[in-house]
């Protein structure tokens, strides 16, 4: 598990796999998942989360978490089995920026 404090306007990039979850401990966050493609059409879904809400990815990929107000985020990742999951643990720790 990882715990992050994010100030308004800051962003966190995470490489997530199915089975991971993001839980908002306090504040309000916007989650923007990587675009999905189907028959040459791309779409992207933004998700707003507030206190107590969860986000669980359905696909492997990057998500961008942006704090809309001062927030605390708990990231729970499955036990790393493959190289992608091990890499996701490292990348989530490294990519907080304003």
Image (cartoon, grey):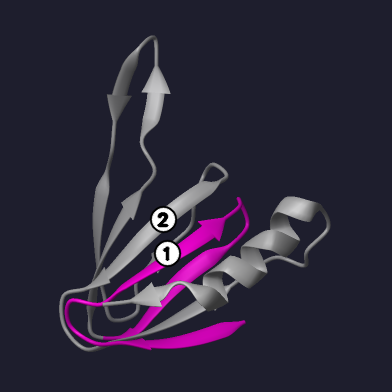
- At 59% across and 62% down in the image, what residue appears? 20
- At 16% across and 83% down in the image, what residue appears? 69
User: What residue did someone put label 2 on?
Assistant: 63
Q: Give the range drawn in magenta.
A: 1-26
Per the picture, the main secondary structure of the magenta-coloured stretch is strand
- At 23% across and 85% down in the image, what residue appears? 27
- At 74% across and 63% down in the image, what residue appears? 86
Instruction: From the viewer's perspective, tell me whether residue 50 is left or right of residue 15.
Output: left
Q: Quadrant of residue 16?
A: bottom right
Place of residue 67 in the rendered image (x, y in percent of width and height, measured from the top left): 23, 76
Place of residue 87 in the rendered image (x, y in percent of width and height, measured from the top left): 69, 61
Give whichever of discs 1 and 2 has the lower sequence position. 1
Figure disc tally: 2
User: What residue did someone put label 1 on?
Assistant: 13
The one nearer the camera, 61 or 45, is 61
Instruction: From the viewer's perspective, tell me whether residue 18 is left or right of residue 28.
Output: right
Marks 1 and 2 in Cβ contact (< 8 Å): yes
Say which quadrant the C terminus sits in.
bottom left
């Amino acid at each position: 598990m990882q715990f992050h404090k994010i100030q308004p306007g800051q962003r966190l990039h995470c490489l997530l796999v199915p089975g991971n979850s993001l839980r908002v401990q306090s504040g309000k966050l916007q989650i923007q998942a990587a675009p999905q493609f189907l028959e040459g059409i791309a779409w992207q879904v933004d998700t707003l989360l507030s206190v107590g809400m969860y986000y669980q990815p359905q696909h492997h990929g990057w998500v961008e978490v942006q704090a809309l107000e001062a927030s605390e985020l708990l990231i729970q990742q499955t036990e790393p089995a493959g190289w992608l999951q091990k890499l996701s643990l490292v990348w989530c720790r490294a990519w907080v920026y304003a």
